[in-house]
Image (cartoon, rainbow, N blue to C red):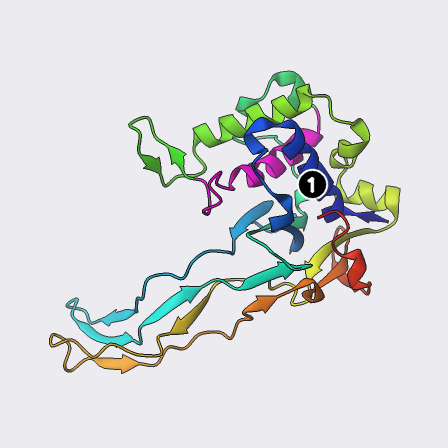
Amino acid sequence: MLHYTNMITCVMRDLVARVSALSFIDLRKVLVFARSGQNSADGPFATCHWVNQPPSNPTHYTWHDRRGRVVKRSEWFVVRSPVVQVQGTRVDYLISFSLPRFCDQTLDRSRKNGFYPRALLRDPMIAKLDTIVHELYHIDPGQSGIRRLERADGGCSARSHGPAFYREVARLVCEYLESRPEPEAIEFLRYSSRDLSGRHGEVVATAFKTFPSFPQRYFEPLSQQPLPLETEPNIAIVPLKTAVRRRHYTERDLETRRFLPKQVSSLKSEVGHLRLET
């Protein structure tokens, strides 16, 4: 049996130890988990989610008629982050990997391949290592959210996936490889999902029991609603309708699942097995 998210977390720990630009990351506050992602469907290979963020400013929705006039609005609300705690430590970032899609990615026809030496492009590990570094590089050094890149004029760019981002990620990947990491630690990244199943029998990963759902931000109506403005005496106020979302998660909300090339299934496990490498 291969525990894929534990293996990825080990690689992250090695990256943080060997690559200076990532050394500020406290992996105790990063939870790695898996989501379902088939090769036949479009979608990301991995994502980085900032969960320990402050509430938004109060806001509301409005509805307009064909002339652009506001005809109704929602209640005022704020957007909040759920609390995620693992073994008493509050998690700041969730990094999810789409399986088996992540296992089967390559740099062929990718816009990333232009940033790597040609010799590295032949190694099937590079695409996956690039994605791992990519998600870690999203973490802001000030621990204040998702990293924003600096433009040439000194301002911050809202585009986190521009050429400068890809170039820097590739540089960090090369720096890591030049540090000569243990081959056994990254060998699993060379294999496809089918190859992994053949070699290890089962590929498992940490997931939330609410699979395929995971902790996400939620809307909360203000307990004290502002009085209607003089400019909106005839505007209808619509009660806020939102999906019910969990507000607190712990290690008890995690489980181990089998991730096969074509399906995902539950695997009962003890809670103590879930955070071995995080």
Which of 157 and 10 lies nearest the eye of the viewer?
A: 10
Residue 39 painted magenta: no
Q: In terms of secondary structure, where does tag 1 sit?
A: helix
Q: Is residue 114 left or right of residue 38?
A: left
**Is residue 44 at least partly visible in the picture?**
no
Give the residue drawn at x 70%, y 31%.
125
12 lies above or below 33: above
Magenta-highlighted residues: 123-147
- Amino acid at the residue labelled 1: Asp
> How far across and down, in percent of the image, does residue 162 sit?
43, 33
Quarter-of-image position of residue 231: bottom left
Check the image and name the residue furthest to the left. Answer: 230
**Is residue 20 at least partly visible in the picture?**
yes
> How far across and down, in percent of the image, does residue 51 sit?
52, 56
> How far across and down, in percent of the image, does residue 95 sit?
60, 49
Q: Is residue 129 left or right of residue 67?
A: right
Residue at image mark 1: 104
Give the residue drawn at x 58%, y 68%.
248
Q: Is residue 38 left or right of residue 21?
A: right
31 lies above or below 227: above
- Count of residue discs: 1
Give the residue drawn at x 73%, y 40%.
10
> How far across and down, in percent of the image, does residue 116 sit?
58, 21
